[in-house]
Amino acid sequence: MSTHTRSSSSLSTSVKTHTGKDLTLPTGLFINNEFVPSLSGKTFATVDPSTGEPIAEVAEADKEDVDRAVDAAEEALKGWQMLPAATRGKLLWTLSDLIDKHTDSLAALESLDNGKPLRDAIDDVRGVADVFRYYAGWADKIGGQVLDYDPALHAYTRVEPVGVVGQIIPWNYPLPMLAWKVAPALACGNTVVLKTSEKTPLSALKLCSLLPLASIPPGVVNILSGGASTGSHIALHPRIRKIAFTGSTAVGRKIMKMAADSNLKKVTLELGGKSPNIVFDDADLDGAVAACFGGVYDNVGQNCCAGSRIFVQSGVYEEFTRRFVEKLSQTVVGPPTDPTTTHGPVIDSLQLSSITSFISLGQTHGATLAYGGTRLGTRGYFIQPTLFTNVTPEMQIYTQEIFGPVACLVRFETEEEVLGMANGTEYGLAAAVHTTDLDRATRMARGVQAGVVWVNCYNLTPPQMPFGGYKQSGIGRELGEAAIREYTREFCVSHIPLAARRYFFKTDFMGFDGLIETKSVIMRMRV
Ligand code: NAD
């Protein structure tokens, strides 16, 4: 258990990680590059999913704390925007180096708080450094265009940051979700108020302590711990100009309403999924089994992209099932630090009971439980990876996001049939196709309705590739150049040189249409 110390200007706690190391961890709200208590003095406990015991108490942000964070972000905005873009890039690069240097402690905290095996947490942290490095490179490459559509006119667009942005992240990949949001926002010159999930606040607090070391100025990044109420104050805040949310579709819908009702802030939503993983008769079967297996069970299925509907063509269905079950029998569910563990616990008792309810529903509705289905032990939240066969499209285990290690195996005959089944959902986050036929791969990639399609692989999210959903899986994109557009707005400048003034008076160029989300500035200047 942790010890808990508190002073008027800072909060910190000492936590013992699973590797036996004692880490001193700040637990306050991170505002203006300082850890401060919440104004109300409220705190909440974060729990170790492998034991069910509290790890630490962290400060909980209320409305007044969100206001303080927005004040700090607003105050910092001008200075941050006025820095040469290359300097912003350099600071992000320094931060990525510091993240690399502190991989062990960041990963240890992530593993402790989230329950994922330590080596997975280390992979996550390496990916986080890569994301910051990628956007460090973008900082001085963001710009507008010269529009040469009329020789009498000097017209161009400028790209500018949106302002103070609000960001809300989930608990399944706490540090990667933070990096996907904070890195592009900063590269574009915005300042940030981010809320972590109440289930996994710890790793972000550690990362906050690196920001001053990277010389990120005070107020540029403000990170608050808290739950739904803190999140709603961010989504409703009248001085926040954009909200980026990752979480469930149900909460995403609320965020969009709050954004509309407050100040019509710009919205990006990364939401849930029920992704199809499609295996054709001609696939490399071992490769397909491995990709489908990782696709649904990585992170104990607590993955927005989880390929939880596995469609297998009838010619290889029996053999695929045999190899898949054999692989399941080799899984080791256990504590995150045991190097033999392949799967850690799920996040909490709520998630565990939701998953076990879905498993019971699957059995009640007549699906065959081919593997797993059982909670392991009574301490912590461990459950066997689970496989259902004989699943039909009406069953809830087939239609709803379970967000746990539960896969449905479905047999199909033709390409047309499987495309209909794959697309027969309101979700559209990710999909995969396993085939050695290139024509079929490109045909399916085009036909499947998903923001990300993997061919003969799964779960690859390099920082260079845009990521996001179709349909109710989301709006907007993260990663890649696409994220730059989400964190900027563009305005047009149309300038008539003096020599062309007569032309100006003759031409109705107020009819000039701006681009999407543009502001037109018509300048008449003495040059
Ligand atoms: P969640 O929607 O319950 O919570 C997400 C975040 O929103 C948390 O920080 C939470 O405190 C906050 N929140 C909850 N209610 C709120 C409200 N009314 N107003 C403002 N904020 C509120 O989701 P979760 O359980 O943390 O994460 C699981 C979900 O996230 C799954 O549906 C999963 O598919 C989705 N997810 C999507 C992606 C993606 O990139 N598409 C990535 C990871 C997770």
Image: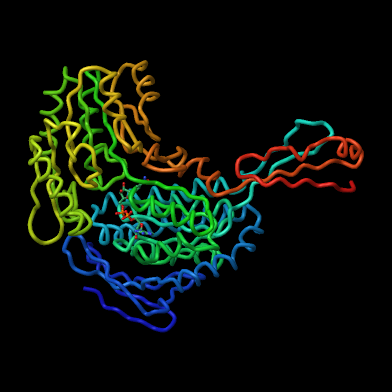
User: Horizontal placement of 289 versus 205: left or right?
Assistant: left
Identity of the residue drawn at 49% across and 41% down: 480
> Can you see residue 402?
yes
Q: How is the image coloured?
A: rainbow
> Can you see residue 370?
no
- Percent across and percent down for residue 456 are 30, 27
In the displayed structure, 176 sits above or below 225; it is above
- Percent across and percent down for residue 45 are 27, 70
Count of marks, rendered view: 0
User: Horizontal placement of 82 versus 330: left or right?
Assistant: right
Q: Along the line of sight, which residue is nearer the eye, 296 or 365?
A: 365
- Percent across and percent down for residue 2 are 25, 74
- Percent across and percent down for residue 68 are 50, 72
Q: Along the line of sight, which residue is nearer the eye, 40 or 190?
A: 40
For the N terminus, the image quarter is bottom left
Q: Along the line of sight, which residue is nearer the eye, 86 or 180?
A: 180
Q: Along the line of sight, which residue is nearer the eye, 5 or 67?
A: 67
Q: Quadrant of residue 492?
A: top right
Q: Quadrant of residue 77?
A: bottom right
Q: Quadrant of residue 41?
A: bottom left
User: Horizontal placement of 409 versus 190: left or right?
Assistant: left
Identity of the residue drawn at 29% across and 21% down: 435
In the displayed structure, 66 sits above or below 481; it is below
